[in-house]
Image (cartoon, rainbow, N blue to C red):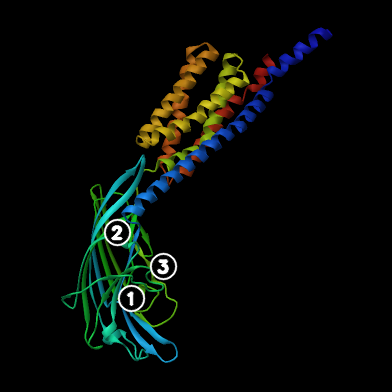
């Protein structure tokens, strides 16, 4: 062979090298992870902005509420430490709550708020729960304390103690139990007299509402027209959930908790044993988009290989820049998904973005290969790929299993398509 023909022949062999083309494709896939990461950071930034907007709404309306008590605080004098307090939990505590949640928006960002009508009733058994070591009790200065996380959310209250209407004062605080709340003077004649209470409270809050198992016997019954509650905390209720809403009933006994019925010291923290319900917003576009981006590498690889095999089958050379353009179209899918998802339901946003990107790749295939068949195959293949990812997103419990199955099937397809590469190279 003449030296004049050696260089063109070598260049042609390099351009037609399958190994070199796969290396270039791998490099392009690696480069495309940079804009993908940028979109992931954009999604996280938008999510943080949404949380900040929600916090502004919560601060004005009322934050997540934890109702602690009511508990009885009785001052007494101790020779060694001056005045101290005896804390007594209710013998029986029954809470009923009718909660009216709603979704509100700050711009495009959604926040879950609620108005709660709560009823607390019960009694204290002072004969049983006041211990002998607490001498010098000042029963005439006893106070009934109800902890409320954000007192700004209180819109109405009605309190009766021993059948009589009682005054209510702000500023209640009890270390380990409540940081803020209501104080109700509750003088008791002596230890033998039970103290009963009936407290009605109207309260604004957001995201969730929680209670403490304060009573020796604590029952909490909640109802709300919200079809997607999240029951959290140390105890779970008997519940019924329908499309119209839910009902939940808690029953907690003295032996189920870690703090005593009364104490005059010690490091008890009943708040750690709170329980209640969160009002989740069913679809969080930012969480769903983040989960979609986790599958981006798989979709990019699928797209690159689809163009690679179309190139081999049609024998129409695809330039590396064209591979890069096809990969960028896949990356822009997530920008479309995020921007559309902030205004329409996630499923609709996903379908619209998938359709647009698949059509764009089909159109691009038509420009590259000058044939309709590869363009149609590319369009259908991309729709199928996005459809498979969408199914995996919906199957949260089986996402790993379905993802592994999809990868294995893709591997089998690639093994089938690449099985004759050496033979085809030899035939050329």
Residue 259 % position (x, y): 39, 76
Dot 2: few (<14), some (14–19), or many (≥20) neighbours within 10 Å?
Answer: many
Q: Residue at x 67, y 18 (%)?
A: 425
Which is more N-terminal, label 3 or label 1? 1
* Residue receiving disc 1: 254
Is 155 left, or right, of 424 in this rendering? left
**Image point (39%, 43%), residue name:** 284
N-term mark: 1 or 2: 2
Q: What residue is disc 3 on?
A: 272
> Which is closer to the viewer, label 1 or label 3?
3
**Quarter of the image where the C terminus is located:** top right
Residue 408, visible in the rendered structure: no
Q: Name above or below for residue 341 compared with residue 279.
A: above
Foreground residue among 104 and 243: 104
The image shows a total of numbered marks equal to 3
The CA distance from mark 1 to mark 3 is 15 Å
Q: Position of residue 97 (x, y in %)?
A: 24, 61
The crowding category of the residue bearing disc 3, from other C-alpha atoms within 10 Å (few below 14, some 14 to 19, many at least 20), is few
Q: Secondary structure at mark 1?
A: helix
Residue 410 higher or lower than 164, as above or below? above
Residue 417 falls in image quadrant: top right
Q: Is residue 355 visible?
A: yes
The residue wearing badge 2 is: 153
As drawn, 85 above or below 44:
below
Number of the front mark, 1 or 2: 2
- Determine the CA span between mark 1 and mark 2: 30 Å
Element assignment for label 2: helix
Task: Give the Cα separation between the discs numbered 2 and 3.
Answer: 22 Å
Would residue 157 be found to the left or right of residue 354 on screen? left
Which quadrant holds residue 108?
top left
Label 1 with label 2: CB-CB less than 8 Å:
no
């Amino acid at each position: 062979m003449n030296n004049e023909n050696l260089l063109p022949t070598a260049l042609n062999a390099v351009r037609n090298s399958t190994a070199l083309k796969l290396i270039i494709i791998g490099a392009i896939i690696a480069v495309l992870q940079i804009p993908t990461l940028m979109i992931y950071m954009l999604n996280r930034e938008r999510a943080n902005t949404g949380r900040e907007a929600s916090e502004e709404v919560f601060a004005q309306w009322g934050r997540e509420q934890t109702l602690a008590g009511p508990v009885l605080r009785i001052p007494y004098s101790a020779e060694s430490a001056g005045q101290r307090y005896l804390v007594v939990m209710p013998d029986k505590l029954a809470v009923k709550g009718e909660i009216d949640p709603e979704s509100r928006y700050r711009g495009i960002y959604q926040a879950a708020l609620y108005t709660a009508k709560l009823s607390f009733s019960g009694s204290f058994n002072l004969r049983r729960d006041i211990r002998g070591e607490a001498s010098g009790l000042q029963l005439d200065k006893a106070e009934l304390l109800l902890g409320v996380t954000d007192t700004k959310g209180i819109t109405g209250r009605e309190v009766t103690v021993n059948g009589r209407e009682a005054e209510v004062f702000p500023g209640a605080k009890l270390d380990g139990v409540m940081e803020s709340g209501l104080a109700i003077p509750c003088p008791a004649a002596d230890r033998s007299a039970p103290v009963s209470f009936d407290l009605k409270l109207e309260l604004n809050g957001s995201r969730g509402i929680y209670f403490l198992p304060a009573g020796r016997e604590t029952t909490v019954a909640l109802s709300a027209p919200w079809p997607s509650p999240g029951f959290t905390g140390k105890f779970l209720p008997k519940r019924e959930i329908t499309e119209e809403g839910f009902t939940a009933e808690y029953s907690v006994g003295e032996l189920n908790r870690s703090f005593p019925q009364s104490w005059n010291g010690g490091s008890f923290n009943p708040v750690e044993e709170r329980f209640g319900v969160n009002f989740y917003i069913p679809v969080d576009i930012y969480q769903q988009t983040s989960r979609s981006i986790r599958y981006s590498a798989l979709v990019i690889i699928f797209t690159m290989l689809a163009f690679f095999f179309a190139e081999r089958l049609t024998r129409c050379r695809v330039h590396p820049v064209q591979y890069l353009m096809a990969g960028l179209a896949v990356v822009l899918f997530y920008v479309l998904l995020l921007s559309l998802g902030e205004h329409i339901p996630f499923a609709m946003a996903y379908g619209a973005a998938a359709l647009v990107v698949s059509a764009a790749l089909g159109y691009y295939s038509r420009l590259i290969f000058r044939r309709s068949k590869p363009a149609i195959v590319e369009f259908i293949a991309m729709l199928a790929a996005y459809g498979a990812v969408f199914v995996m997103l919906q199957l949260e419990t089986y996402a790993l299993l379905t993802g592994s199955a999809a990868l294995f099937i893709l591997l089998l397809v690639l093994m089938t398509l690449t099985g004759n590469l050496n033979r085809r190279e030899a035939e050329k």
